Amino acid sequence: MGYVQAVSTGSTGVNFATLAVCRGLGQKVTSRVAEISSLRKLQPGEVMFAEGDHADAVYEVVRGMLKLYKLLPDGRRQVTGFLSAGNLVGLAHENLYLYTAEAITPVLVCRYPRQRFDRLVEEVPGFARRLLAATSDELRAAQDQMVLLGRKAAEEKLASFLQLMGQRRGGGEDPDEVLLPMSRADIADYLGLTIETVSRTLSKLKSDGVIAIPCASSIKLRDRDRLQHLAAGDRNLERR
Amino acid sequence: MGYVQAVSTGSTGVNFATLAVCRGLGQKVTSRVAEISSLRKLQPGEVMFAEGDHADAVYEVVRGMLKLYKLLPDGRRQVTGFLSAGNLVGLAHENLYLYTAEAITPVLVCRYPRQRFDRLVEEVPGFARRLLAATSDELRAAQDQMVLLGRKAAEEKLASFLQLMGQRRGGGEDPDEVLLPMSRADIADYLGLTIETVSRTLSKLKSDGVIAIPCASSIKLRDRDRLQHLAAGDRNLERR
DNA sequence: CGCAAACTTGATGTTGCTCAAGCTAGGTGG
DNA sequence: CCACCTAGCTTGAGCAACATCAAGTTTGCG
């Protein structure tokens, strides 16, 4: 693209007016966004950008799922988020990316070169405000995640995680089915646990009748109420 | 205030042009900011707003230190941040505050009523962009904190914390002195540890010659190099 | 059908938590 | 001015949750 003036392109099937960056910005701006953007496809496991790379673009996920993570020097990893359609990536980075973004499923992203994107932010009234709202929401999620990492037990972590994945509906099927496209290792590194503890804890939730596990990448919620209580952390309300 | 037109007021000693919200916005805007603002003082332990309160204002810390925290139903607490002069509070909250903000030291804050603040965000070009930058920076800090909470050992957590507190210089004294105005309980709830582990780990750092502890609320850095290595997490570079 | 990667399950180990005393410092009243 | 009192901090002993190490088992792909 870059030369494409139309808001929607038949070849890619992407309608720019439906993209998150454009929401509430009118058609004129939408076509400007379309002008500066290009599409990129990623295979599972492919790294979109790595921690420390020069941050020369902002991305929006159109299809599929990405994980973001940071590494410690000895290889310990913390997954800071899973992103799906509508999420923006790389907004916060001035100069260098501070985390790695890697595809979990086949992914389609819309790429906005940094400089031109920044120009839009300057010139389009209300654009910065939309981005502020998006970033504030990410911050809110990050704070919830800090509570999870710092203060929740393994079972509560998994319950919270399943609820979170449950609300991003992955398609119009069974509302009790939660699809987990990421590996157990990714889940473990997101929740601050090991693979083994994730596996064991899911097995326990299964044997307690809270969930069913038809296959490793799909969980069925059998007792949403109990899951909700576990996730909220209202165990032990008797003590203290 | 509210009726005050001047950019600086002798009575409070607060010069609005030096406030973080005004940085880079020119004098005209600065005086508009001054117009909508009021000052509020808080005693140590006083709650500025609580999780769940109606989010009717944005604040900027002028003096002193605040802590932000979230609670689980059974009383477990996660401190999500310590804020000092220049930090904004409550920006992200649309309707209800999602954490409690409580004074650690005597605090002076500048209060901006939500509605009028939002009007400024709409009307002042570049204001939303400044707030976006501030929020992005908070998000970056939150991501670092996720790595700390999810993947660092107790000793690494304390080392990271001391470094962080060390860079927000609390006055022009000894550059090796780090002041800790918050309690051990606050530190524990920030790092996802218990009071006892915080205390023990500080004692260990002391006996290892990394720090000295003249009194509980002041730490002296004796081996910045070793502290840096601990904080970065490059232990065990041999394995894996 | 076979292979490798991902997942599960089991046995054992370790870090940090819990419970329980002491200790210290700062503030108050005699 | 000093002694006491209390809140906050430190230290110790035992324990539990989760990590580590080590097999098995399943799954999906060539």
Image (tube, coloured by chain):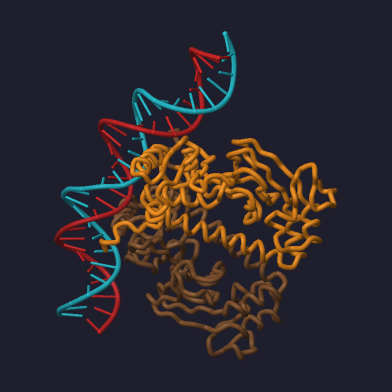
Chain colours: A brown, B orange, C cyan, D red
Examine the rendered structure and indicate whether residue A19 appears above or below residue B207: below
* Observer able to see residue A66: no
Identify the residue at horizontal 67%, vertical 50% (top origin): B60
Tag count: 0
The picture places residue A21, in percent across and down from the top left corner, at 61, 73
The picture places residue D20, in percent across and down from the top left corner, at 24, 55
Taking depth in this image into account, of B14 and A60 the one nearest to the observer is: B14
The picture places residue A86, in percent across and down from the top left corner, at 55, 71
Q: Which part of the image, by quadrant, shows the C terminus of chain B?
A: bottom left
Taking depth in this image into account, of C9 and B223 the one nearest to the observer is: B223
Identify the residue at horizontal 62%, vertical 64% (top origin): B133
* Observer able to see residue A94: yes
Taking depth in this image into account, of B112 and A170 the one nearest to the observer is: B112
The picture places residue B216, in percent across and down from the top left corner, at 47, 36
Residue A15 lies left or right of residue A153; in this view the side is right
Q: Residue pushed farthest front?
A: B174
Identify the residue at horizontal 52%, vertical 48% (top origin): B175
Examine the rendered structure and indicate whether residue A112 appears above or below residue D4: below
